[in-house]
Image: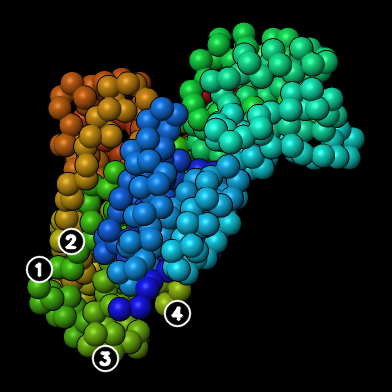
């Protein structure tokens, strides 16, 4: 059997969006992954279920596998003909022992590829608004690790203390007192600016700045957690000028998105781009109807008015059309109504411009746009199996002949409650977003009465529209935020505005 190959892959500093394209390709196609402790859970979550994963994480004084055993594991798995990914935080060749591993792999006659990652030594300061080089402050950069091998000659403190450029200490948080002592002992002024950056590039990032004289006290008062970087140099002064990441409107907020996972990506991305730490807790998934009888009946019929009540209704309708070998021409001659801007946009993407779109995201908001006398009017309503019958009942009362076409179902899913319950217990959730009545009911039904009360007592609840708001009110209070239009963009903007109003 021919040997496989070992890929020493840098996963970057923590923000999953900083993963390189090559790294993502290799993760997606790996047979075996040796996973490092500093790889973010968001990146680890993209590992395919077909890959075997072995945790080889190493923290200070807590090594799951010794280095020689890791080397042996990588080589042995490659010799089985497998594609082996050694997934490491940051860059494998920047204090990541990638050089040592590559030496052993090559010596064993196994092919190796090095995939650089964005090092936290560069990305961490950048996310804190600190350029590691700047023509006015620093024209050199020195990287120092607090973890040195037995063969190391040690840090040259006298030389280091004389540098005018930027010094970044990696994995040295526990040695901050020693770093301060050694630098000042060897001549560096106590007024030299210092920054300590905890959880760099992650939503939990925190930056404390000061000088060599006071940084220990400030860090102790802030109770910064590890991992953390230490930046010494005049460039630290730029933190207050460029601090772009920690000044995002939702920075420091924890948001829960309850939407179906296949639909949640846009909202998750928007919240994350605004600085929030996002927990995806899908409470529903979109499934085909139990049978296609009602939708096929509608597709075969001819109607004066066809009403689409949601994006999923549009998708389900057209998916079924195409399976049947038909297209949008079956709608010729019908007036088209869309409930909500996103539903309208989905129809437009398919070449259909709706004739009616109510301002509110609720099916009954169409009623004022229709004549009171609907006698002789044939209407089709395309919606979920679980939808409200209020619109159909009122149209029937007005004399219309109404057919229901079920295009999809909202099916409850059992998301892992462990992390959510931990966050509720710690009062760590700031925002919960709901995009349908189904997400509301399926979310709160998973919680105990005590958990519901605790969450509703302190958390900002955000609703995408009136129907969702009605569902929220059934649990004892209304939402803090209701989106003015039924789109995730509008929901996101409403949340940002509400948080800004509270923090002014």
Tell me which residue sits at (37%, 35%) in the image.
63
Q: CA distance from mark 2 to mark 4?
A: 25 Å
Q: Earlier in the sequence, mark 1 or mark 4?
A: 1
Q: Position of residue 415 (x, y in %)?
A: 22, 45
| Marking on residue 325 | 3
Q: CA distance from mark 1 to mark 3?
A: 21 Å
Q: Position of residue 203 (x, y in %)?
A: 50, 36
| Marking on residue 351 | 4
Q: Contact, CB < 8 Å: mark 4 with mark 3?
A: no
Q: Earlier in the sequence, mark 3 or mark 2?
A: 3
Q: Is residue 454 visible?
A: yes
Tell me which residue sits at (56%, 39%) in the image.
201
Q: Contact, CB < 8 Å: mark 2 with mark 1?
A: yes
Element on which disc 4 rests: loop
Is 238 drawn above or below residue 116 in the view shown? above
Report which residue position mark 1 lands on.
290
Q: CA distance from mark 4 to mark 3?
A: 17 Å
Marks 2 and 4: which is nearer the front?
2
């Amino acid at each position: 059997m021919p040997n496989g190959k070992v890929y020493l892959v840098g996963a970057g500093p923590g923000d999953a969006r900083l993963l390189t394209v090559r790294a993502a390709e290799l993760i997606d196609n790996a047979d075996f992954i040796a996973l490092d402790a500093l790889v973010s859970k968001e990146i680890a979550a993209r590992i395919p279920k077909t890959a075997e994963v072995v945790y080889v994480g190493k923290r200070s004084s807590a090594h799951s596998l010794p280095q020689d055993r890791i080397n042996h594991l990588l080589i042995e798995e490659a010799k089985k003909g497998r594609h082996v990914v050694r997934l490491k935080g940051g860059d494998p060749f920047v204090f990541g022992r990638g050089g040592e591993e590559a030496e052993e792999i090559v010596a064993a006659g196994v092919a190796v590829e090095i995939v650089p990652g964005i090092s936290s030594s560069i990305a961490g300061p950048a996310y804190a608004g600190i350029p590691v080089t700047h023509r006015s402050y620093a024209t050199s950069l020195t990287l120092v690790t607090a973890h040195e091998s037995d063969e190391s000659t040690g840090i040259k403190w006298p030389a280091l203390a004389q540098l005018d450029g930027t010094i970044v200490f990696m994995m040295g948080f526990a040695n901050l007192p020693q770093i301060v002592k050694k630098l000042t002992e060897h001549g560096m002024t106590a007024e030299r600016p210092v920054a300590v950056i905890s959880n760099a590039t992650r939503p939990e990032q925190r930056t404390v700045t000061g000088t060599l004289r006071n940084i220990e006290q400030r860090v102790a008062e802030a109770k910064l957690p590890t991992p953390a970087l230490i930046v010494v140099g005049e460039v630290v002064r730029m933190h207050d000028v460029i601090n772009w990441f920690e000044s995002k409107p939702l920075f420091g907020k924890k948001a829960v998105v309850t939407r179906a996972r296949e639909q949640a990506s846009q909202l998750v991305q928007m919240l994350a781009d605004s600085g929030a730490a996002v927990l995806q807790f899908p409470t529903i998934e979109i499934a085909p109807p139990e049978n296609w009888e009602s939708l096929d009946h509608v597709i075969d019929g001819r109607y004066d008015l066809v009403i689409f009540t949601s994006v999923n209704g549009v998708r389900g309708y057209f998916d079924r059309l195409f399976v049947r070998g038909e297209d949008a021409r079956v709608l010729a001659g019908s007036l088209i109504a869309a409930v909500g801007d996103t539903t309208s946009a989905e129809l437009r993407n398919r070449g259909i411009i709706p004739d009616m779109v109510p301002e509110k995201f609720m099916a009954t908001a169409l009623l004022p746009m229709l004549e009171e006398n609907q006698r002789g009017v044939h209407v089709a309503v395309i919606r979920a199996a679980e939808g409200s019958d209020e619109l159909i009942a009122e149209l029937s009362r007005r004399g219309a002949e109404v057919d229901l076409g079920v295009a999809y179902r909202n099916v409850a899913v059992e998301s892992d409650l462990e992390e959510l319950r931990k966050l509720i217990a710690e009062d760590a959730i700031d925002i919960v977003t709901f995009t349908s009545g189904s997400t509301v009911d399926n979310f709160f039904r998973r919680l105990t009465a005590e958990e519901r009360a605790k969450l509703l007592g302190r958390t900002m609840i955000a609703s995408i529209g009136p129907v969702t708001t009605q569902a929220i009110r059934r649990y004892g209070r209304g939402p803090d935020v209701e989106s003015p239009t039924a789109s995730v963009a509008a929901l996101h903007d409403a949340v940002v505005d509400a948080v800004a109003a509270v923090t002014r």
